[in-house]
Amino acid sequence: MPDNSKAQQTLGLIRDIDPEAIRLAFRFIELFNKPDSSVKELEEFVRSNDVLSLRVLKMVNTFATANAQHITTIDLAVGLVGYKGLREAVLSASSISILTGERGAIDTISFWTHAAACACIARALAIHCHHPHPEHGYMAGLLHDLGRRLLDVYASEGDEYQAVLDAMSSEEARALEKTLYGVDHCEIAEYALKQWGVEPFLADAVGRHHMRAEEIKHSAITDRAVLTYAIIAIALAFHLLEDEEGGPLDQELLVLVGVSEAELPAILVRAREYFGSVRVNLESLRPQGAAGR
């Protein structure tokens, strides 16, 4: 982590941020990955947080409309969408606060749509590769650009971050971040996640998502596979989004996780299916009349 006055000033601005949304998502992922987790445990988890309960019910009611039902309890929600459907709704609802909220130069709707696409592809890759915790891939993809939100919302004055968004390349953007804030978005996100006590794999993946395959091979990283899923997902996200252009994919990344290019179409089909439900879930949580920033 850079040791200069500008960097320390920027880092100081985020030390007091309440990371409850991220902790909530992680508590759910722990429950999600328990092989013996039950419907009752999931219901108790949702009921333990009033805001989460309201979000989940709002989300489920989006689907209930076609059945002329209005779902008012978690019990009824389970009956309508089932255990699997409720788990997906909870994951989306517990993640939404990470992606939206305070406004800055970044268009939050475009931001979370891109993040969700990356999350779904990283999850699909993890499932395809039989990773024991595919939701780790989901969270790494979802939060890979968390640092951009932190710099934009907490460290910028007005639309200061717009200059970074207007940069011609990711290298130019990160160099400008260093000039403006003393740190780039990877460094501030890794620092924040470590400060907030999240699992090391996520801090590693978010802080190193611009790495090349050769760098990954020789780095001390908690879970190289999760990092690699996230980086591949970022390059492939345009397949799920209408308004993005594709970036180059380092073929050595595929080699690292044992995936061939011929397997990518099937992986993207799985990701697209999941992205459809996640996107509807997240859209259902958008405030009435909200469009763009």
Image: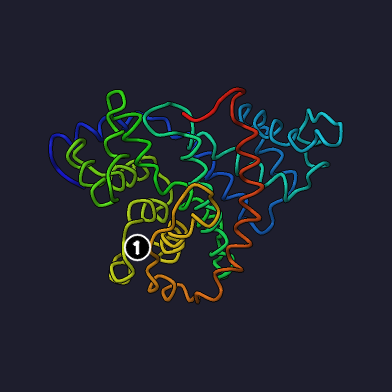
Q: Position of residue 92 (x, y in %)?
A: 60, 42
Q: Quadrant of residue 64?
A: top right
Residue ranking furthest to the right: 68
Secondary structure category for the residue under label 1: loop
Q: What residue do we see at 62% from left, 46% from top?
A: 278
> Which of these two is toward me, 208 or 44?
208
Q: Residue at x 30, y 23 (%)?
A: 158
Percent position of residue 11, x then y: 25, 35
Nearer to us in this view, 201 or 256: 256
Residue assigned mark 1: 221
Closer to the camera, 25 or 164? 164
**Residue, far left:** 4
Residue 110 drawn at (x, y percent) = 48, 39
The answer to whether residue 18 is left or right of residue 39 is left
Q: Residue at x 29, y 66 (%)?
A: 219
The residue at 34%/44% (across/down) is: 189
Picture layout, residue 134 above or below residue 147 = below
**As drawn, 204 above or below 66:** below
Instruction: From the viewer's perspective, tell me whether residue 256 is left or right of residue 266.
Output: left
Q: Amino acid at mark 1?
A: Ile
- The answer to which of 276 and 132 lies nearer the viewer is 276
| Colouring mode (rainbow / by chain / secondary structure / one colour) | rainbow
Mark 1 residue crowding within 10 angstroms, few (<14) / some (14–19) / many (20+): some
Task: Please give left or right for residue 165 compared with residue 273 in the image.
Answer: left
Would you identify the image quadrant in which residue 123 lies? Answer: bottom right
Q: Quadrant of residue 223?
A: bottom left
